[in-house]
Image: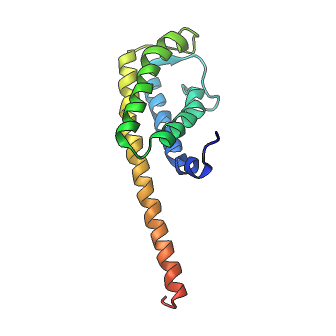
Amino acid sequence: MPLDSKRVKQFMPVALFMVALYTILFQMAERWNWWNLNANVFFLTNISSFVYGFLIVAIIYVFYFTYPNVWLFLIANWMIDAIQAFVISPYIFQKLGLYSMKNMSNFGLFVMIAVTVPIVYAYQKWQETIFAERNEGFLSKQFSEKDGNH
């Protein structure tokens, strides 16, 4: 079952915002030695391909299936974040040698990831108000031009 492309496009700005947010977090991780990344995106330092690949797909899917229900969105994300921090990170990514934790624990990783969840939800809500205001202005201009009111 393919996803509705209109809804997918609705969540592209928040996915790109999430990429920007995680890019900053990965740069902070390098500065404060939270973890050591063994393979990174070639044009940036200490950034996993996870940020520019899987993260975009994951956030669009989570928004697609949970939005606008804030509690469903938060709980689904926090469950995924817990799996990421306490299962995937230590037992898959670190075992494969993709990275190693340094000055941050897996619990710290979970908190860092979990804090971004309400931020991206708020960003999506804000984006919708911006687009709604822009569309209202566009529609009112269109109707006033048809009525001869400029």
Number of callouts in the render? 0
Q: Is residue 32 visible?
A: no
| Vertical order, 88 against 137 (above or below) | above
Residue located 47% across and 21% down the image: 84
Q: Does 128 appear above or below 18? A: below
**Position in image of residue 124 (x %, y %):** 43, 48
How far across and down, in percent of the image, does residue 14 sit? 49, 45
Q: Is residue 77 above or below residue 68?
A: above
Residue 142, percent across and down? 53, 79
Where does the image place residue 71, in percent across and percent down from the top left?
34, 38
Foreground: 44 or 50? Answer: 50
Task: Identify the residue shown where x is 46% and y is 18%.
Answer: 35
What's the residue at 47%, 77% (across, down)?
140
User: On the picture, is 65 further left or further right than 108?
Assistant: right
Query: 99 or 72, which lies in front?
Result: 72
Farthest residue toward the front? 1
Q: Nearer the viewer, residue 57 or 19?
A: 57
Screen quadrant of the N terminus: top right
- At 35% from the left and 33% from the top, the residue drawn is 115
Q: How is the image coloured?
A: rainbow
Query: From this viewpoint, is residue 144 visible?
Result: yes
Q: For residue 107, which quarter of the picture?
A: top left
